[in-house]
Image (cartoon, grey):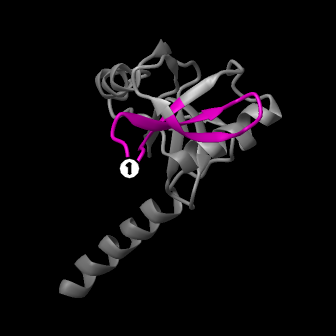
Amino acid sequence: MNRFILIPLFLLGVLFESSAQTYSPGQNAEGGIVFPTSKKKGFVVAEKGLGLMTWEEGKKACEDLVLNGYDNWRLPSKTELGIIYYQFYMKGIGGFPTEYYWCKTENKGIRQLAWCLDFKDGQEYNSHSKTNNKYILPVRTY
């Protein structure tokens, strides 16, 4: 009798595995613009930024954000911000302003500084004071 129970459970597992949603880069899904990093995982960038804020204000605004039914937003990593720049901004996806954007990475040597990326030329900087205003672009992992 156990064999008859295991077979339907196995088939149910296969059904759920094969029905997992896959996305293309730049597709609108999961609450924003998707960039898949594997068949089932990736990150989503909000379609619109939160405006100019200090690093601390932006970090808190992302953590407090509830957007399109999701509440797990955060500042992007340096890698994610680079992907947003090269895979979305440079291709005209998202309509993001040509500005400096904060990422979540702090300067390891000087805690008052954090990394940002300039969407004008794609340059990363690790020497911007966290008290400066930069654009905030929330992301979330799916």
Residue 11 is drawn in which quadrant?
Answer: bottom left
Q: Quadrant of the N terminus?
A: bottom left
In magenta, the rendered stretch is 102-127
Specify whether residue 126 is painted magenta: yes
Instruction: State the residue lying farthest toward the front.
Output: 110
Residue 118 is drawn in which quadrant?
Answer: top right
Decide: few, some or many residues near mark 1? Use Cα within 10 Å; few <14, some 14-19, many ≥20.
few
* Count of marks placed on residues: 1
The residue positioned 46% from the left and 64% from the top of the image is: 17
| Relative depth, front residue between 82 and 1 | 82
Q: Position of residue 43 (x, y in %)?
A: 51, 45
| Relative depth, front residue between 56 and 131 | 131
The residue positioned 57% from the left and 61% from the top of the image is: 39
On screen, residue 121 versus residue 36, left or right, reads right
| Relative depth, front residue between 105 and 80 | 105
On screen, residue 25 versus residue 80, left or right, reads right
Q: Is residue 93 above or below residue 2?
A: above
Q: Position of residue 26 (x, y in %)?
A: 69, 38
Residue 62 is drawn in which quadrant?
Answer: top left
- Kindly state the secondary structure of the residue where label 1 is placed: loop
Identify which amino acid the numbered label 1 is placed on.
Answer: Gly
Q: Is residue 127 above or below residue 4?
A: above
Q: Can residue 1 be spotted in the picture?
A: no
The residue positioned 59% from the left and 51% from the top of the image is: 36
Which residue was labeled with disc 1? 109
Q: Position of residue 40 (x, y in %)?
A: 50, 57
The residue positioned 30% from the left and 71% from the top of the image is: 9
Q: Can residue 7 be spotted in the picture?
A: yes
